[in-house]
Image (cartoon, rainbow, N blue to C red):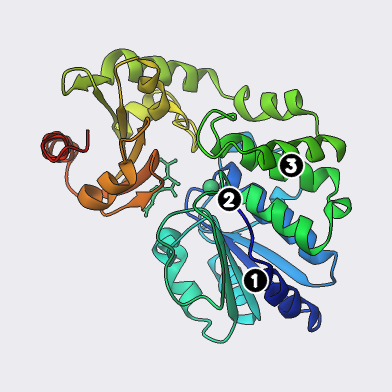
Amino acid sequence: MELQHQHIEQLRAMLAERPQRIVIVSHTNPDGDAVGSSLAWAAALRTMGHTVHCIVPNRYPYFLNWMPGIKELTIFKDTPEEALHLVEEAELIFCLDFNDLSRLEILTDTLTKNTSARRILIDHHLSPAEGYDLYFSHPDSSSTCFLVYSLIEALFGVEQITREMAEALYVGMMTDTGNFAFSFLTPELFRAVAMLIERGIVIPEIHNRVYNSYTAGRARLFGFAINRKMELIHNGRVAYMSLTEQEMRRFGFQQGDSEGFVNYPLTIKKVKMSVMFLEHTNFIRVSLRSRGQVDVNLFARKYFNGGGHKNAAGGKSFVSMEETIAHYIRAVEEFAAEGYL
Ligand code: 5GP
Ligand code: MN
């Protein structure tokens, strides 16, 4: 991952003009990377005198509640008028941690109401949409937080990173790499982590707050999902799980409780691809994970109108759970027949 000097200078020029009204938006079901990159980037821009607001479509998971500044996020679902006002007033809009406006779901229309603001993409997903004034699109970056770290380093120098910013950046680096176990674990990333330690983060503390802060209901739901709902197909090489709204209610489900479930079947030696189907009121959210060369970004695009990264992707289904699972099983057979599995 290398930032282009020319793009850095373009961004520097845009930000140097005068104090501006800036909005940072991130994706639906904001995760540690979405929230962490938004908070850190907002803090960095504020040091230049800009007025900055962060907007997310819906609530973040409760295990991120402790993050410094998180209460200042504008949640579109809770306060749509405020979000609309901020977007309309914005002179500069940063889009963080998503590749296409459709990923904003209920916030998409609001964002298209402002046609005059300049737009800048800072993201690490494949296939960025067209129409931005400036791109920092780096699918070879392990997280958007690492991208934001690199931008701050290039524009302002790492001395500008406060402990709060460092904590926010570390959350995204840690969660998007599965605690430093997935792809793109470069020397530069670990140098950045070393620098964040110098800026004051305490890694075990952050780890505990993010990964060891769940409810008992969540632990029991996890046991239920693995024990009762995990199915293995394709000679044990492909796994799937599903949870209905009723099942989630039984365990006192809160947003974020299913985080990480889909990864677990990949701890089985033979399993190369895992999927989780989560029932929502009007659709089923599809979460996909894979190992090695199995490309779930391609699978999600082909069969679930979604996308993401090679080893972590998602999409949606608008038919019943039974039909969704039947569609999935057929899709796995076709995918395998075409040599992708
Ligand atoms: P998760 O399973 O954690 O929700 O998502 C995994 C990855 O897939 C994330 O990088 C996310 O951006 C991407 N993703 C999830 N849902 C969708 C979707 O509906 N459309 C697209 N294009 N990408 C998605
Ligand atoms: Mn991310």
Disc 2 or disc 3, which is closer to the eye? 3
Disc 2 C-beta below 8 A from ligand 2: yes
- The residue carrying mark 3 is 192
| Figure disc tally | 3
State the SS at label 1: helix
Residue type at the position of mark 1: His
Taking 264 as reference, is 45 left or right? Answer: right
Residue 270 % position (x, y)? 29, 17
Residue 34's disc number: 2
Give how far apart the Cα atoms at labels 1 and 3 are.
Answer: 21 Å
Which residue: 16% across, 39% down? 335
Marks 2 & 3, CB-CB < 8 Å contact: no
Query: Please, is residue 261 above or below residue 12 in the view?
Result: above
Marks 1 & 3, CB-CB < 8 Å contact: no
Taking 205 as reference, is 95 left or right? Answer: left
In the rendered structure, which disc, 1 or 3, sits on the residue that comes first in sequence?
Answer: 1
- The residue carrying mark 1 is 7
Residue 329 % position (x, y)? 14, 33
Viewer-proximal residue among 285 and 217: 285
